[in-house]
Amino acid sequence: MRIGKLLLLLMAISAKATFAQSDSLKLDLKQAELLFLKNNFELIAGNYQIDLAKAEVITAKLFDNPELEYENLFYNHETKKFLQTSYEYGQFAGSISQLIKLAGKRNKNIKLAQTGIKLAELEYFDLMRTLKFELRNTFYKAYFSNRSVKVYEDQIKSTESLLKAYNVQLKMGNVALKDVIRIKSLIIGLKAEQASVLNELEDHYKDLKLLCGLAPAASLSLILPTNDDQNIMVDKIPYANLLDSARTNRADLKLAKTDLEYNELNLKLQKAMAIPDVEISLSYDLKGNYPEKYTGLGLKIPVPLFNRNQGEIKKAKIGIDAATSNVKKQELLLSNEVFNSYRTAIRNERLYAEIDPAFSHDFDKLIVGLIKNFKERNISLIEFLDLYESYKQNILQMNKLQFERMSSRAELNYVTGSNIFK
């Protein structure tokens, strides 16, 4: 009975493990992007920066608070009493004052804060553009790395099958020991290469999970469906259209221009800050002034004799010069990135187009025949190993080429700030 229960327990654990392995999250690029927009922590932090900028506008719209001042007689040595307020024995004075900002400082502060919101929003969109490209690139890396791992798995499986057959032949004295050793060496080499690709794949999965906000233990199964945009010919898209799209949509260029606008508004504000503000006050004094029960209207204004805000005005002017230079740099960077990405995409597309679609399938059939001929000793072990290596390199190069093609398309989206390839 105990043995029976133990077997049932082991079977249950095994079934559970099998289910856990098969229970992987199937994820295509669109689903990955939805998870990214919802869960990415950098984007969430960027949203908080926009909220902070909006709070600055609330602060800029607020008026200065009025100030109340009150003074009372603390101790009357004649009556020997504290804090008397009566007309006969006490004394007190009070005033209320209000600061009035001149030269439109409040409105200029509001405009500056509103421009700060635009800056925060553009920083958010540029961050999204960058992370979206990283997401797509990582997705493609993981997908094609996984395909390469499967190439190694198939090759290792067939080679191990071949090794078993050779071990049988070795015992019968039909093959040499050196041939068996070579096949074993081939398997060790394949497993070492597979381990390296697996390490890269795990890194890609880690990056993808971080971008999408997924748990570390999530098992991913990536899907790359054939979309209509895969048939779009890159060389048929005019370069001028791509450049115009980049100039219209790139958030980093808009950010540089808005930063220039921000510095121009700041210069206006700093010039306004050189104009003194006025403080108006109304006061009352019971007996400390002439006449008694004195009421007075006060006006206070600083004399701009020494400090005319010269330093901040100069800093604002320097900020404009720096922002102007940054706009020119971004425009040049943008045009160079679009040109380079366009050339790279065309080159990858043409190289991919030169490959016969049936080539990979024909090569798979060829390798089956190769194994069969080797088992029948129609070719030598050295020829078999050379052709087998060629087969592996062909499949790996095909995966690399397809990745580079998809990556260059994602980069065109990135440098133009648009969604040409969905």
Image (cartoon, rainbow, N blue to C red):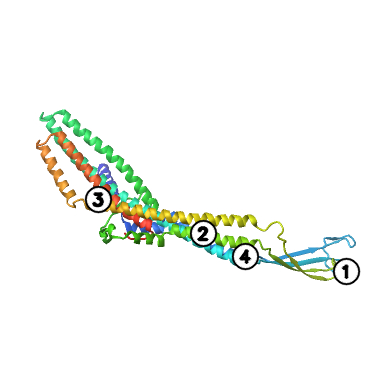
Amino acid at circle 4: Lys
Which callout, 1 or 4, points at the residue further toward the start of the chain?
1
Q: What label sits on residue 351 in the rendered view?
A: 3
In the rendering, at what x and y percent does residue 323 appear?
51, 56
Residue 222 position, x and y percent, is 29, 53
Residue type indicated by callout 3 = Leu
In the image, residue 108 sits, relative to residue 36, either above or below, namely below
What residue is shown with label 4?
105
Query: Looking at the image, which residue is at 17% across and 39% down?
Result: 387
Marks 2 and 3, how far apart at CA: 43 Å
Q: Which comes before the other along the chain, label 3 or label 1?
A: 1
Residue placed most toward the observer, 145 or 123: 123
In terms of image quadrants, where is residue 267? bottom right
Q: Is residue 403 depicted above or below 62 in this figure? A: above
Q: Earlier in the sequence, mark 2 or mark 3?
A: 2
C-alpha distance separating marks 3 and 1: 104 Å
Disc 1: which residue? 88
In the structure shown, which secondary structural element does the residue marked by tag 3 occupy?
helix
Q: Nearer the viewer, residue 64 or 398?
A: 398
Counting other residues with Cα less than 10 Å from the Cα at mark 3, is it few (<14), some (14-19), or many (20 or more)? few
Q: Residue furthest right?
A: 78
- The residue under label 2 is which amino acid type? Leu
Residue 210: x, y in percent?
Answer: 39, 51
Q: Earlier in the sequence, mark 3 or mark 4?
A: 4
Judged by depth in the image, the label closer to the viewer, 2 or 1, is 2
Task: Give the crowd class for mark 2: few <14, some 14-19, many >=20 residues within 10 Å.
Answer: many
